[in-house]
Every structure is written in structure tokens, then in C-alpha cells.
Amino acid sequence: MTAVYWMIGTLLSFSLMAIGVRELGDRISPFEMLFFRSLIGLAVVSSVVLYNRQQSLLKTGRVPLQIGRNLINFLGQYCWFVGITLLPLAEVFALEFTVPLWTLMIACVFLGEQLTKVKVASLGMGLLGVMIIIQPTAAVFNPASLIVLLAAVSFAASYVATKSLSLTEFPLTILFYMSLIQLPVSLVFTLSDWQMPQGAEWLYLLIVGFTGLSAHFCIAKAMQHADASVVVTLDFLRLPLIAVVGMLFYGEAIEVAVLLGGLIMVAGNIINVRASKKRIKASTKAVTSH
């Protein structure tokens, strides 16, 4: 039950972030949103580290990988923010569910992970879900869908890099360098189109900044209290929740194709996660039996 509470925090964080980005999109550029998100993240993480007197966490021996990971992640966040302003919220969130599938493919290519029959089936279900959502042959196809897919591929590549970093770096170290590296990058891109936030825009910028941290913190805590397959299942609730948000706040229609495609992709993810869990258990038993 504890995992459910943490996942509620995750769902609320992602939904509030999407609302913040949508509300800011008419006047504040995605680059400026990313600048304030990085600024808030850097302030929060640095404060936590200094308060706990853990300054050693601010050091890293893997600078090139930190830079590469965060440039790719920056691209993904930019594309995601742009997608939020151009597409129905439910479609953006549904296409984001392809991240585990791209991660699987990238890990197989660059980390040498084995491509099993289950993984192939998972990939097939993911691609089927994408086709159902974006309807590439239909007259209603929106090219902005490709921007969100680029975001998903970028997030997947950054996750693979994070997996490598997590072997030697603490989570707070990774978060610190994410904000530290992306802050000047976003500043350079936003200087030519800087708009001073006004009124409620400051509130939405704070929401985007804090929910960017709280979403990842909550999902990490949920993983500590439940299996990954359970967390993935609960995470699917993001889709119907954001569909309702889009309908109530922005008059967006709830598309059956988006919900169906998202469900197929999540089912593929769950199949892959459970198969991975079984392989880990089998490997553990083999080791202990010897």
C-alpha cells in the first residue's frame, strides 16, 4: 500500500508539471522553462547536500558521461515541453510510454543485453501501440507526434547512461550534475527570446521546477516498496488521469485510440519486466545452488 501512496505523488507531479508547461506555453519558451527548472533543481539538491554535510556527493569521476547524458536528456525535455504545447496531453503521455521500449533496444545495442523472444514481443506490442496512437496513414496525423517520440528516444538513451552512472554515482550526484550542466545550456538558448515571467507565471515555473524533482523522487520510493511490474501498472494511471485533466481544463476529447494504444504499450512493458524478474530469480537460484 505504501507504493500506491508514492505513485499517487508521482501521478500528481507529472500531471501538475504538464499543466504548468501548458499554461506557460503561450508566452514562456521551453528553453526558459528548462532554465528555471534547472535553477530550482540545483538550489534544492545543493541545499539538501549542504544541510546533510555531504559535500563529497558534489564530486564525480565521470564528467564526460555526465555531460553526454545531460545533453541528451536536455533534448528530450525540450521535445517533451514542446509536445505538451502542441498535442493533447493524453497523446503526449501515451507516446512517452515508449521510453522502456527504446531503452530496451538501446541497451541491447550498446550494453550487449540479450534480445530474447519476450523482449521482441514487447517491442512489437510497443510499436503496435504507437501506430494505433499516431495513425500515420490517417488524415488526422499530427507531425508533432514525432517530436514526442524523439523525446522518448532521448529519455531512453539518458536512462541507459543513468544505469551506467548509478554503478558508481549516488542519485543526488546525478541530479546535481543534471541541473548544473543543463542550467547554462538552457540559458544560452533562452537569451534571444527571454520573457520576464509575470504574475501567476512565477507560480507555474515553481510548479514545473519542483514537480520535476518530486516525480522522480516519488517513483524511486515506490520502486523500494513494490516490484517494478506493479509500479509500471500503477504508472499507467497517468494516461486516464491526464486525459481527464485535458478534458476538464482544456476541452480535449478523450481518444479511444490513445487509451487503447497506451494500454497495449504498457502491457508489453509489464510482460518484459516480469520476464526480467523471472530471469533474475533463476540466476540467483543457480548461483546459490552452487
Image: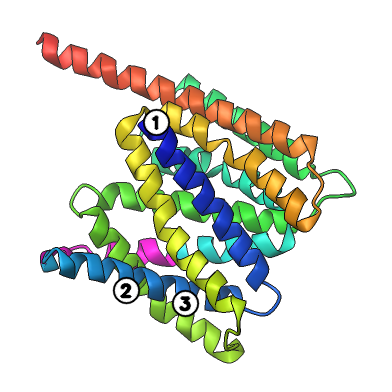
Q: What's the amino acid at mark 3? A: Phe
Residue at which label 1 appears: 228
Magenta: main secondary structure equals helix
Report the residue at 46% width, 26% height from top: 272
Residue that appears at 40% across and 59% down: 213
Does 57 sit left or right of 109 as displayed?
Answer: left
Way the structure is coloured = rainbow
Lower position in the chain sequence, tag 1 or tag 2 = 2
Q: Is residue 62 magenta?
A: yes
Which one is earlier in the sequence, the residue at label 3 or at label 2? 3
Determine contact: label 1, label 3, CB under 8 Å.
no
Q: Which residue is mark 2?
A: 43
In magenta, the rendered stretch is 56-71
Q: Please provide percent x and percent y for residue 150.
A: 59, 56
Q: Residues within 10 Å of mark 3 (few under 14, many from 20)?
A: many
Tell me which residue sits at (59%, 65%) in the image: 20
Assess whether residue 287 is covered by the magenta stretch.
Answer: no
Please state which amino acid type lies under the numbered disc 2: Ala
Q: Quadrant of residue 222?
A: top left
Task: Write down the residue under mark 3.
Answer: 35
Tell me the element at label 2. Answer: helix
Q: CA distance from mark 3 to mark 2?
A: 12 Å
Q: Where does the image place residue 15, in percent across and percent down from the top left? A: 58, 52
**In the picture, which quadrant includes the C terminus?**
top left
Residue 155's place in the image compared with 289, above or below, is below
Which kind of residue does numbered mark 1 sit on? Ala
Coordinates of residue 260 in the picture (x, y in percent): 72, 31
SS category of the residue bearing label 3: helix
Closer to the N terminus: mark 1 or mark 3? 3
Task: Give the alpha-carbon distance from disc 1 to disc 2, as whole Å.
Answer: 30 Å
Furthest residue in direction right, as rendered: 139
